[in-house]
Image (tube, rainbow, N blue to C red):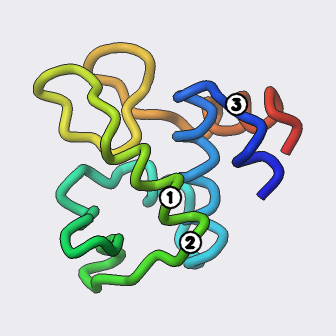
Amino acid sequence: LKAMRKTESAHARRALAAKLISVLYGFPLEYVLEMDRSCADTSGGRLRIRLNGDWVKVDEPVAKLLREVVAQTGYARDLRLFPGRLRGDRLSVGGVQYYLREIAV
């Protein structure tokens, strides 16, 4: 939770959100990083994500962080939930590790 409050970098917040989903829901980080925006539903004031075909409710404070990720606009046609720094790129496991080290998690 401390890391969520102290990081302002959009890339680091994306990395933190991906890692939290991986750890909290028991899915490999590689799987989480492959998710696209259709795997997140923010309707009705709640947040759900689709993991392995099932919709799962995301509780606060992780939901707040993930809502920020969903709302971030990347490149116009990029549907990735966790885009990388370059057009057409996904955030990688190495990228997640880099950003988490940057915020000392």
Residue type at mark 3: give it.
Tyr
Q: In the image, residue 73 lies at what x, y percent?
A: 27, 29
For mark 2, give the secondary structure. loop
Residue name at image x 34 percent, y 34 percent: 72
Q: Are marks 3 and 2 in contact (CB under 8 Å)?
A: no
The alpha-carbon separation of the residues under discs 2 and 1 comes to 6 Å
Q: Secondary structure at mark 3?
A: helix
Q: Quadrant of the N terminus?
A: bottom right
Please tell me which residue is depicted at 37% across the width and 83% down the height of the picture. 56
Q: Residue 40 or 33: which is nearer the viewer?
A: 40
Q: Point out residue 52 in the picture as x, y percentages from the top left corner.
A: 32, 78
Residue at mark 3: 99
Q: Residue 64 versus residue 104: which sits nearer the camera?
A: 64
Instruction: Check the picture and name the quadrant holding the C terminus.
Output: top right
Query: Dividing the picture into quarters, in which one does residue 12 lie?
Result: top right
From the viewer's perspective, tell me whether residue 4 is left or right of residue 21: right
For mark 1, give the secondary structure. Answer: helix
Q: Are marks 2 and 1 in contact (CB under 8 Å)?
A: yes
Marks 3/2: CA–CA distance: 22 Å
- Looking at the rendered structure, which numbered label has been put on residue 60? 2
Going by the numbered disc 2, the residue's amino acid type is Glu
Front disc: 3 or 1: 1
**N-terminal-most mark, 3 or 1:** 1
Measuring from the top left, give residue 97's x and y in whole percent.
72, 37
Locate residue 93: give its quadrant: top right
Q: Is residue 22 left or right of residue 3?
A: left
Q: Which residue is rendered at x = 14% and y = 22% of the image?
A: 76
